[in-house]
Amino acid sequence: MNSVSVEAAAPPVVRRRGDVIFAGLARAAGITILVALAGVAIFLTLESAPAITATPEELGGDNIIVYVWPLLFGTLLAAFLAILMAAPLSIALALVISHYAPRRLAKPIGYLIDLLAAVPSIVYGLWGIGFLGPQIYPVYEWLAENLGWLPFFEGPANGRSILTASIVLAIMALPIITAICREIFSQTPTLHQEAALALGATRWEMIRMTVFPYGRSGIVSAVMLGLGRALGETMAVAVVLSATGVVTFNLISSVNPSTIAANIALKFPEATGVDVNVLIFTGLVLFLVTFVVNFLGRAIASRGVVKESR
């Protein structure tokens, strides 16, 4: 006699009113962000069209690519130098706070680093031009005298250089990267860390074998967020940098490439006619660069998550 198995019907899913409202608000917020992003992209594209179709005579004798390239070069160079300095220091600070410093000391250090994010960018700019530039000038002189054969330190030395602006940008990106890395490192499973220590690993070996692999995708995301801050910074760079609009790898002289954001801030108030469209076009270039950087960061972070899940 065949037995008939009767499966119990699954109970209906009851959604609470609060869950429905929250889901609707979250969905609306996501759609609003996408609409705003699309609106910005459409506005920049439409307003940039006159600059793209303008003749070299209307642009002062140069085409739009010749005008934008030094600004893009300066933006990428300053951001790259800033992240090159900020990323290792931020990761080290995050490790000190999460794994090395005593709790009574780790919390105040974390609070102080978080406070750096609340300082206005103009304050960083004034600090860079009023304190950092004069104080670091002797170092630049030493670099020009002893390492002047390198294209990076040809000189003549000047405190208002691209390297000074990059140091300021690194300090501004440091609290963002440190805060995210600190939270990621503190979420590493305790059992993994204790297992590594039980097998005889030192604290550094434990961090290398458990903390870094667990937080790899988060570290990449943190660095990319810091890079986004460095790419879009305006006032600090505009105040510190002595820009001349050239393409050069000399990091310590007064002949420096400007950045897109700083150039827009300095020239937009006096711009008229097609010059406004040219500045908006440079803003579109910065928008695309920032979008690509964040997209690559998310792609790398997502690939790291997939590998960890396997």
Image: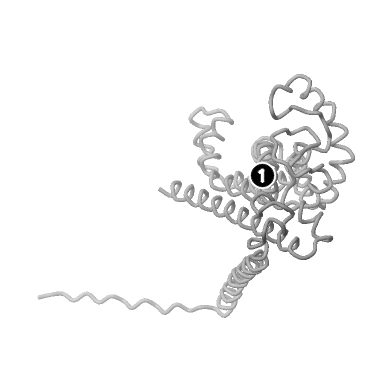
Q: Note whether 38 is above or below 196 in the view shown.
A: below
Estimate the x, y position of residue 18 in percent, counting from the top left.
59, 77
Residue at the farthest right position: 130
The one nearer the camera, 164 or 306, is 164
Q: How many marks?
A: 1
Q: Note whether 40 is above or below 179 in the view shown.
A: below
**How crowded is the residue under tag 1: few (<14 C-alpha within 10 Å), some, or many (20+)?**
many
Residue hosting label 1: 73
Q: Is residue 109 left or right of residue 38?
A: right
The one nearer the camera, 52 or 95, is 52
Q: Is residue 43 left or right of residue 169?
A: left
Q: Residue 166 falls in which quadrant of the image?
A: top right
Residue occupying the point 74% across, 34% down: 251
Scheme of colours in the image: one colour
Q: Is residue 67 left or right of residue 239?
A: left
* Three-letter amino acid code of the residue under disc 1: Phe
Dot 1: element: helix
Residue occupying the point 90% across, 40% down: 130
Residue 174 is at least partly visible in this image: yes
Residue occupying the point 52% across, 38% down: 210
Estimate the x, y position of residue 37 in percent, counting from the top left.
62, 66
